[in-house]
Every structure is written in C-alpha cells, then in structure tokens.
Image (cartoon, rainbow, N blue to C red):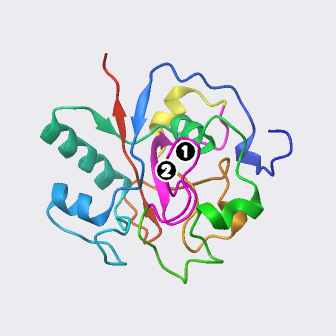
Amino acid sequence: YENEMRQDDEKPHNVIIERGFYMSATEVTQAQWTAVMGHNKSFHKGDSLPAEKMSWKEAVVFCEKLSEREGKTYRLPTEAEWEYACRADGESLAMDELKKSAWYAMNSRGRTQPVAQKQPNAWGLYDLLGNVSEWCADGYVADYAANAEAVAQSRSKVIRGGAYDSFPPACRAEARTNGPAAYKYTQTGFRVVLEITH
C-alpha cells in the first residue's frame, strides 16, 4: 500500500485480527433500526436508506438490543475489522473506480441513497465507502501505537468510510475521522459485526 495518500494519523501498521467475524452486507437501514429501536430519528427518511443521526452510544444500544433479541452477539466493528473488510484483503479502491461503488459528493445529489445500489466489494459488502460514514467500536487516538488504555479512555470514537457529502479524499479505506460518542451526525450511521463463537 505504498502509493496510498495518507494523513498523519493514517500511518500503516500491523494488526492481527485473532477471531473471525461476520459483517452486515450493508449499513443498518432505517427499517432495521425501527424494528429494533421502535422509532426513526434519521434526517433523510426512507426504509431502505441507511439509518443516521444516531450517536455512537445509541449504535451500541442497538447492538445490545439486537443481541438480546436474537440470542447472538452483535457489536460495532473494530477499526481494524472495518478496514480489513473494506479492503477485501486487497488495496484501497482507485479513485477512478469510486463512482461505481460509492455515493459521494460527486453523484449523491446531496443526500443518502438506498443501500446496496452500487457495486459491492470482493466480499459482497456494499457502501463501505460513501453513503454514510460509519461508527467503529474504538476510541480515537491519532497514534495507532498508543496503548490500549489510551484507546479505551478516548471520549472520541472512530468514524470511517466517508459519506454522501464527502469528496474523494475522505472516501478511502485508510481515511479516518472521529466524533464524540454522544454526537449525532446526519452523515453517520453504522453496520454491525456478528461474533463467531464456535
């Protein structure tokens, strides 16, 4: 990944993902959110649109309620899991291919779009780049080498993927941003990971 454009907080580093996981093929939709939470607070309304305008804390509550309902363990992806899934074990998406697989500032008409309308990646995952950016489980630190305690204590949480109003530099597998855990953004949603227990 030597040719990738990187910011100071995006330096390459080795990560070992020790356990397998399943990731939802799309961002959580408003229909799915409403079925679990009983209400829909999204700014752009539509059952097949990604749910947005929820805080990181509310996304965690969704995972907890879904886990209880289904008797399985759902959670937000770690930052490493998210990037691994986004890359589909390959390089970052070339900018000239972005329009085929992402809703972003150049083609979204200034709003979210129904999930799974663009090309999926090699592992069948849709909209990892664009549409809505996605909360990850991790606390945000600028230095990946920070210890686990610093990550756990960070009040800001990692956001990945870029959104419908993002320009191409924000829609990269390696691009990172963050926000306070209680903040709600009309450009930010999430997808879930199902833990493999056997």
Quick one: 38 or 11, which is closer to the camera? 38
For marks 1 and 2 on the same chain, the one whose residue lies earlier in the sequence: 1
Mark seen at residue 156: 2
Identify which residue is drawn at 32% across, 72% down.
42
Q: Position of residue 27 (x, y in %)?
A: 41, 56
Residue type, mark 2 in image: Ser
Asked if labels 2 and 1 touch by Cβ distance under 8 angstroms, the answer is: yes
Residue at numbered disc 1: 140
The magenta span reads 116-144
Task: From the viewer's perspective, tell me whether residue 197 is left or right of residue 4.
Answer: left
Tell me the SS state at disc 2: strand
Q: Does the magenta stretch include residue 118?
A: yes
Task: Determine the main secondary structure of the stretch shown in magenta.
Answer: loop
Q: Position of residue 196 (x, y in %)?
A: 34, 24
The residue most toward the bottom is: 109
Q: Where is residue 197 in the image (x, y as percent from the top left)?
A: 31, 20
Q: Where is residue 133 in the image (x, y as percent from the top left)?
A: 51, 60
Q: Which quadrant would the C terminus be assigned to in this image? A: top left
Identify which residue is drawn at 37% across, 78% down.
44
Task: From the viewer's perspective, tell me whether residue 182 is left or right of residue 102.
Answer: left
The image quadrant that residue 35 belongs to is: bottom left
